[in-house]
């Protein structure tokens, strides 16, 4: 829909131009509020263990891999696409880097292997979508199936234990008292934020997702950019594969299962429009943390995972409804 | 007997007075023709009749009773069916399903498919095409066939008034004959047709009476269909009092520098062997009807469409065809016809829209220099007098004229040599138009080669140094603007005979 609000420039109130930003901030503040409320609930139910250093560290380490995947997913969704294959790519990259043959070359090769497999799968997605003109849903669904199949074939459906101690020592260790996994999440997030908000790549991502035809007619190579965005998402999956393998000290074709759903949910909760063109990485990060805290509260209170899943569903719907009301109050265009 | 009477219909869209005191009267069994230039308000009027737009003022009387048409369904129930220019059929389903879309014959909630098929067969036979099977997929029919389906749908609703919006635009000669035969049979049964066409000879063939719209007003109602062409053209074109074209002190054309050269440009089915050249500081106007290939030519020069043949060169250097990226690099810019759908990113700020084509110039190693971006955008907005000149506002908050300036600003920031403007004043109110005209002349004065496409002949003549007249995808005239008159151009594009200025004036 191209319905737009027309503001008479003469009568527009001063301070109006900042409204867009303010709305974004307002939404993020709301999300942050939800996160704080959840933490209070956690503290109230388990005052002895919830806010301990150990529990926070556990939560963040669990959130780390899905957080990294969600960074890539945010780019894809802002560019107007979707990636259903992230979970399978995490599995494939994890299996590939932990095969006996790969491990025999040492930790550096293992890391490179995971990154290359992730990037490669992502680029295949991107090329199929941009140059092959297959809709993202279908192309990444196909990748979801094939990457999973390849992971199963490579591993023979067996869990491959990491015997290369250099790798595990580093990724399971601490730097300045903070786990490397959490550092990795922070680094990917920071780089992602700069890329999205301060570079031509990010600007083009918003443009392609907001209106691909207008972006094309402005001289942007929309197809190349689309391919690169999926490549970036794949690379994030490669990094996440490293993190999962480090955390579980093994590679298996079941790694990364349902990551696509968790990542999409986190991105949407974070205020990124599924139709593209608008979104924020900070929102995505808060979305990931909200899910992690909810999961932790349920685990700490020994509640079943089925109730946990129901709660997740309710949170997704509530967040989207909330955002729609704020969007409507803003009276701006909806696409 | 009068079937429909519309009196004093007015409709305002944000920034545009689309209809202002429109009167229309249609009698039973007549073919009433509606004439007017693009932007005269015909489409809006049709949508009011179809129940798609609600008028702000005025009365509609249907079969002697005052009525309202609050929705498309309400209009159909009363017997008003509309055949839009872009046919509104569902291409993937069958003819019968399209004909009965939304009012399928049912029994106990189940659709009666056989009844629908039988009725469709009868209707197609009545329309003279019994060979079109009700089971055919609509998307596989020719344009003429699809039009018949659209008409069958109107008949299935037992329409008393069928609105046809340029029904012959996509038809071959023999298909036109069949259409006119059907129209003749319908009117014999008392069905009225409101017929919109730019082709005056068609109006002579089948029309009963003519109503002429201009700038959203009825300027002449119920004229006989044999009113002389010159009179009709005068009524349609009678120059707008409000629009004043800025006076150019002196021509800015630099004949020593040919910036854009196009030769033998061809795209099958759209345009054929189009050639022209534009000098630095020159404004070339392109006149022609919708569908004559105007936008297609601009988009092809810009690389958004791939030509079947032909060459494009900027400053003598050939530009790779079919690539927007190459065209932009060569210094070509386009302000597209659909400003919101093709030109702007409504979610972004003005500054981000303005620098979108020059991102590499505003970045180092991929990192954006946001301070310079903001400063340069602001300077350009001020130069174009875009108000308010605040580059941090969302572009969606601006009026049509200012949005158009933002698109122009994008190419100005990029420093383009050739600027292609496709209907730059569409949906722009009169005051903002005058400013856009000034901007166009300033660009030319700065040495930019401008190509301007407009449906309003007066605009083309008022702004351009030279005018290219198109008909059916071919250039039929390439003259200096001051050698042409509005009625001469209208005559060339409409009547189908290239008349010389002496005859027309």
Image (cartoon, rainbow, N blue to C red):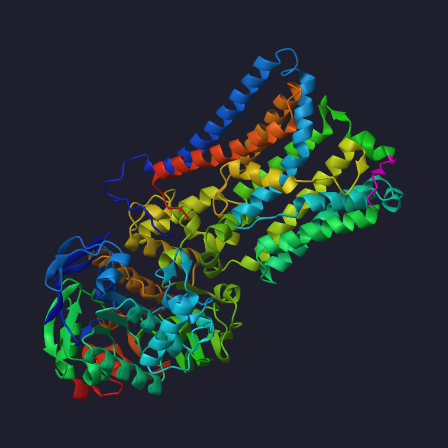
Q: Give whichever of B161, B36 is nearer the camera.
A: B161
Please indicate whether residue B12 sits to the left or right of residue A144 in the image.
Answer: left
In percent of width and height, residue B449 lies at 37, 69
In percent of width and height, residue B190 lies at 18, 75
Say if the magenta span includes residue B421: no
Q: Is residue A283 above or below residue B167?
A: above
Identified at 68% across, 22% down, the residue is A57
Please indicate whether residue B426 sits to the left or right of residue A130 in the image.
Answer: left
**For residue B401, what is the image quadrant?**
bottom left
Identified at 55% across, 39% down, the residue is A267
In percent of width and height, residue B369 lies at 50, 44
Q: Residue B454: in sight, yes or no?
A: no
Q: Give whichever of A212, B212 is nearer the camera.
A: B212
Q: Give whichever of A305, A127 is nearer the camera.
A: A305
Please indicate whether residue B128 sits to the left or right of residue A35 in the image.
Answer: left
In percent of width and height, residue B351 lies at 41, 47
Q: Residue A31: in sight, yes or no?
A: yes
Identified at 28% across, 81% down, the residue is B182
Q: Main secondary structure of the magenta part?
A: loop
User: What is the magenta range?
Assistant: A157-164
């Amino acid at each position: 829909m191209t319905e737009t609000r027309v503001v008479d420039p003469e009568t527009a109130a001063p301070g109006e131009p900042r409204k867009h930003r303010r709305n974004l901030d307002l939404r993020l503040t709301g999300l942050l509020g939800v996160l704080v409320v959840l933490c209070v609930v956690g503290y109230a139910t388990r005052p002895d263990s919830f806010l301990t250093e150990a529990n926070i560290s556990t939560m963040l380490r669990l959130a780390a891999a899905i957080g990294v995947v969600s960074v890539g997913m945010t780019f894809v969704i802002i560019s107007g696409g979707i990636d259903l294959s992230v979970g399978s790519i995490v599995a494939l990259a994890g299996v590939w880097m932990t095969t006996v043959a790969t491990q025999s070359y040492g930790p550096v090769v293992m890391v490179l292997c995971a990154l290359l497999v992730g990037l490669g799968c992502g680029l295949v997605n991107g090329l199929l979508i941009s140059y092959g003109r297959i809709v993202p849903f279908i192309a990444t669904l196909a990748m979801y199936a094939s990457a999973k199949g390849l992971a199963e074939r490579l591993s023979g459906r067996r869990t491959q234990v990491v015997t290369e101690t250099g790798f595990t020592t580093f990724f399971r260790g601490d730097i300045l008292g903070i786990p490397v996994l959490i550092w990795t999440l922070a680094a990917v997030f920071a780089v992602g934020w700069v890329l999205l908000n301060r570079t031509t790549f990010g600007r083009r991502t918003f443009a392609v997702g907001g209106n691909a035809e207008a972006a094309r007619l402005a001289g942007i190579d929309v197809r190349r950019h689309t391919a690169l965005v999926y490549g970036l998402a794949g690379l994030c999956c490669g990094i996440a594969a490293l993190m999962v393998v480090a955390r579980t000290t093994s590679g298996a074709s079941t790694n990364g299962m349902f990551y696509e759903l968790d990542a999409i949910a986190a991105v949407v909760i974070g205020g990124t429009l599924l139709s593209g063109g608008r979104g924020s990485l900070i929102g995505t990060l808060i979305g990931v943390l909200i899910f992690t805290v909810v999961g932790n509260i349920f685990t700490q209170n020994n509640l079943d995972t089925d109730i946990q899943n129901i709660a997740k569903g309710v949170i997704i719907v509530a967040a989207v409804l909330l955002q729609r009301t704020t969007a409507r109050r803003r009276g701006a265009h909806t696409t | 007997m009068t079937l429909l009477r519309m009196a004093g219909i007015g409709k305002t869209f944000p920034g545009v007075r689309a209809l202002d005191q429109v009167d229309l009267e249609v009698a039973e069994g007549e073919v009433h023709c509606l004439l007017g230039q693009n932007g005269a308000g015909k489409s809006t009027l049709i949508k009011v009749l179809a129940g798609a737009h609600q008028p702000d003022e005025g009365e509609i009387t249907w079969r002697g009773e005052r009525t309202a048409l609050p929705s498309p369904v309400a209009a159909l129930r009363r017997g008003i069916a509309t055949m839009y220019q872009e046919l509104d059929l569902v291409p993937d389903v069958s003819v019968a399903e399209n004909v009965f879309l939304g009012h399928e014959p049912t029994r106990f909630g189940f659709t009666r498919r056989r009844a629908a098929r039988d009725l469709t067969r009868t209707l197609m036979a009545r329309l003279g095409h019994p060979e079109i099977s009700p089971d055919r997929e609509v998307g596989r029919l020719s344009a003429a066939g699809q039009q018949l389906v659209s008409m069958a749908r109107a008949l299935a609703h037992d329409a008393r008034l069928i609105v046809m919006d340029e029904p012959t635009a996509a038809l071959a000669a023999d298909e036109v004959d069949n259409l006119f035969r059907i129209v003749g049979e319908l009117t014999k049964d008392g069905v009225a047709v409101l017929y919109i066409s730019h082709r005056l000879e068609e109006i002579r063939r089948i029309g009963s009476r003519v109503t002429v719209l201009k700038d959203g007003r009825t300027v002449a109602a119920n004229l006989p269909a044999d009113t002389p062409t010159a009179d009709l053209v005068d009524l349609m074109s009678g120059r707008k009092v409000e629009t004043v074209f800025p006076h150019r002190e002196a021509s800015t054309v630099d004949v020593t520098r040919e910036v854009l050269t196009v030769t033998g440009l061809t795209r099958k089915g759209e345009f054929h062997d189009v050639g022209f050249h534009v000098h630095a500081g020159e404004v070339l106007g392109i006149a022609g009807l919708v569908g004559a290939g105007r936008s297609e030519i601009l988009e092809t020069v810009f690389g958004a469409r791939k030509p079947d043949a032909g060459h494009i060169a900027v400053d003598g250097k050939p530009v790779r065809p079919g690539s927007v990226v190459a065209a932009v690099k060569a210094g070509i810019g386009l302000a597209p016809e659909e400003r919101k759908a093709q030109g702007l990113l409504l979610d972004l700020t003005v500054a981000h829209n303005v620098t979108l084509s020059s991102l590499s110039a505003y970045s180092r190693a991929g990192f954006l220099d946001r301070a310079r971006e903001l400063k340069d955008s602001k300077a350009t907005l001020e130069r174009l007098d875009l108000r308010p000149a605040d580059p941090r506002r969302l572009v969606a908050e601006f009026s049509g004229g200012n949005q158009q300036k933002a698109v122009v600003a994008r190419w100005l920031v990029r420093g383009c040599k050739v600027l292609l403007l496709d209907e730059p004043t569409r949906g722009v109110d009169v005051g903002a138009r005058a400013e856009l005209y000034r901007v166009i002349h300033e660009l030319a004065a700065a040495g930019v080669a401008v190509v301007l496409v407009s449906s309003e002949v007066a605009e083309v003549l008022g702004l351009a140094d030279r005018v290219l007249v198109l008909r059916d995808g071919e250039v039929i005239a390439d003259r200096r603007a001051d050698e042409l008159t509005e009625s001469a151009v209208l005559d060339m594009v409409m009547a189908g005979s290239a008349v010389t200025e002496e005859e027309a004036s």
